[in-house]
Image (spheres, rainbow, N blue to C red):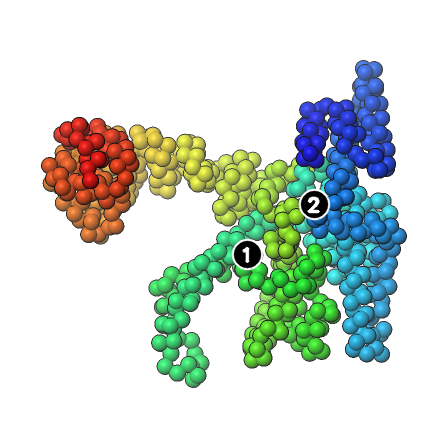
Amino acid sequence: MIKDYRNAVETALTDGRLKEAFRLLRQMTPGSAAELRREIEHAAEDYSRIIDYAMTGNPDPGREEQLAGIRSRIYSALDLAIREKEITDTPTLYYNTARTERLRPADTISALIEQMATAAQAVSPFAMATLSITDRQIRRKEVESAERRVFERIWVTVPLSTDDAAKILEAVSSEDTPERQRLMIISALTLNALQFYSERTLTTLLHIASLASPAIQVRATVGAVLIMARWPRRSNSVAVRNLLAVLREGGRWSKDVELTLLQLIRTADVEKISRQMQEEIIPEMIKLRPDLYKRIDNPDEMIEMNPEWEEMLEKSGLQSKLEKLSEMQNEGGDLFFSAFSMLKSYPFFNHPSAWFMQFDTDRSEVIEVLGHDLTMGEMVQVAPTMCDGDKYSFILSINQLPEAHKQALTRQIEQANINLAEMAGAELMPEEQARQSILARYVQDLYRFFRLFRRKAEFTDPFRRMINPVGIEALAPDFHEEEKIRLVGEFFFKHEHWQEALDMFRLVTPDAQIWQKTGLALRKLRRHHEAAEAFERADMQHPDSPWTLRQMGRAFRAAGMSDKALEAFLRLDALEPDKAETALSIGYCYLELGNYREALHNFYKAEFADETSAKPLRPIAWAAFINGDFETSRKYYDRLMTRLTPTPTDYLNMGHLALAMGRMREALNFYRLYSPEPVRLLEALRADSEILRGAGVDLTILPLIADYE
């Protein structure tokens, strides 16, 4: 019922029937929501005034902007009306929290932030110096409880009032507010507006994005981009555009948006990396273990690396996979998702705020695990390749490890950090790279929350769809330069997001390389005819590229245009004579065009060009059969049986050959290997009936063959 109302109101807005939208809003808004009903009537009155003025015939240059404002107010009222209906008894965590907060009207955002500030002062080093261990832990828990309350209140407060937004901005701007609390507040704002759009929430984040701290700027930018991607039309308001214009003048915003989008694109590889780890890397390593042990005479005395290990890794194919993963990590890929996804069941992760909490050795959970020896915690804190959530997972899992393993891990992390410190000292990590590292870690925290949180199904996952800047109007000025558009397009292309790459490539002036990549992306999407046209354009701009001709020929063949494919492959053969692969392609084109003699000639040419390859066997055997040379066909099918694994189609074709040669028993055997199901076999025989007729087969026997048992 609620979904029907939403669809009806949104349809009315799309059609420009705003009065109908107001009628539906009045109908669905509960009588108890007096403030909301007043807002609806005020918006309706403003709309009536716009209509009345329009009827005077006087020019109104601000009309479209005013109507956009009315539509935005209708959308907001729709959200609030739905929220009022669902808050009564919807059992999700969001609505459970919202109902609880309604029972505490005195606990405003301002009041809770003040309480959190007071609690934070009580855990200052000076205040804690004279307290017992127990009292210190009590105070820490009081701070953490206050932080959670602030997070909850901000998360479910819709819409934020002017006072709420001012207090939040004041708290995040203040150097007196601990950084972990400032960062937590930004994440609460992000979850708030991902649930229900609020212009004030978004503009508050944009104000925060102008602050000095890189961590705060980055987190606010990521939140704002996710919100604008979630609500592209509604976020394209005058207020938002004006704020973005100011941010762009500061010089940092556009670059951060670019980095954010590239990092968000990378998240699409997380599942791929995780699957590769679980299905390929780890099983291969397990299989290699016995061989490694056999080659170690005395493992206790072995110090240097064994060069044979490298050889084994190369032979197994594992080395190239590990190198690929290393490359992904260097580019910001998330290699730890798979490992740490198993460690998110601790009670610490039961509440959303924990997933966005900066790692802090002063957290009560960390102290409960490590006690007063915080060496491990301090090393984990500065580990640059782990996001905050994974750092907490790591520490919380320590208690499950034997003491020897704990010590070994401590040494490994310590050594890794020493190496990183040496690298940083030698290279002085650029500010841009450090900023990108902060961004990558935060996106990983967000990704883990939406993919691993125990009640993740109750949230709209912003990572479910690929974020494409083309569809976010408010961000269009950040991507007006062709160089940036091309960069994002190339990034989509490299990460195999073909449609998104095409969307970006269409916005740049295409050169031969863009047409080549457009063609390849279209082929990956199985749009072969369009792909062939793109390769033709690439060929026009950069003629006689062997790669382009090869891809063009393949695209034309896949599109069923064998004559055009043949032209491309003949040009390729002239450029690179005597290539087996090209000869095969030419042969297939001739075969599809019915020129069996030329097809056979080119298949022989391919065989001669590469005598070690078994690829020509199948087409030679079939072309010889079609050409009536049964003995040659039989010879090549015999070779195929010994050098290749026959396919069902091979068995069908060998059955045809045996049938044409009068070897009925042999034919029946091959046909049964093709399919023991009479119906399927008869369908295949009838589909090839013209070929069989040309080979001299009496077609009346076909149903009898299928029925023979």
Question: Residue 112: where, in percent of width, then height?
Answer: 84, 56
Task: Decide: is 369 above or below 481.
Answer: below
Q: Is residue 571 left or right of residue 265?
A: left
Q: Earlier in the sequence, mark 2 or mark 1?
A: 2
For disc 2, the marked residue is 194
Tell me, for residue 528, which label it has, or none: none
Q: Is residue 424 visible?
A: yes
User: Can you name the residue that lies furthest to the bottom here?
Assistant: 301
Viewer-nearest residue: 115 or 201: 115
Q: The C terminus is located in which quarter?
A: top left
Check disc 2 and report its element: helix, strand or loop: helix
Question: Residue 401: where, in percent of width, then height?
Answer: 58, 74
Q: Quadrant of residue 234?
A: top right
For disc 1, the marked residue is 333
Task: Decide: is 555 above or below 339.
Answer: above
Question: Residue 353: where, in percent of width, then height?
Answer: 72, 57
Q: Is residue 443 visible?
A: no
Q: The N terminus is located in which quarter?
A: top right
Q: Which residue is pictured at 84% across the width and 51% down the height?
A: 103
Q: Which residue is pictured at 57% across the width and 62% down the height?
A: 342
Question: Residue 107: where, in percent of width, then height?
Answer: 86, 54
Q: Which residue is pictured at 41% across the width and 64% down the height?
A: 284
Q: Residues within 10 Å of mark 2 (few under 14, many from 20)?
A: many
Q: Amino acid at mark 1?
A: Gly
Viewer-nearest residue: 307 or 541: 307
Viewer-nearest residue: 668 or 346: 668
Check disc 1 and report its element: helix, strand or loop: loop
User: Can you name the residue that lies furthest to the front here?
Assistant: 709
Give the Cα separation between the discs numbered 2 and 1: 25 Å
Q: Quadrant of residue 119?
A: bottom right
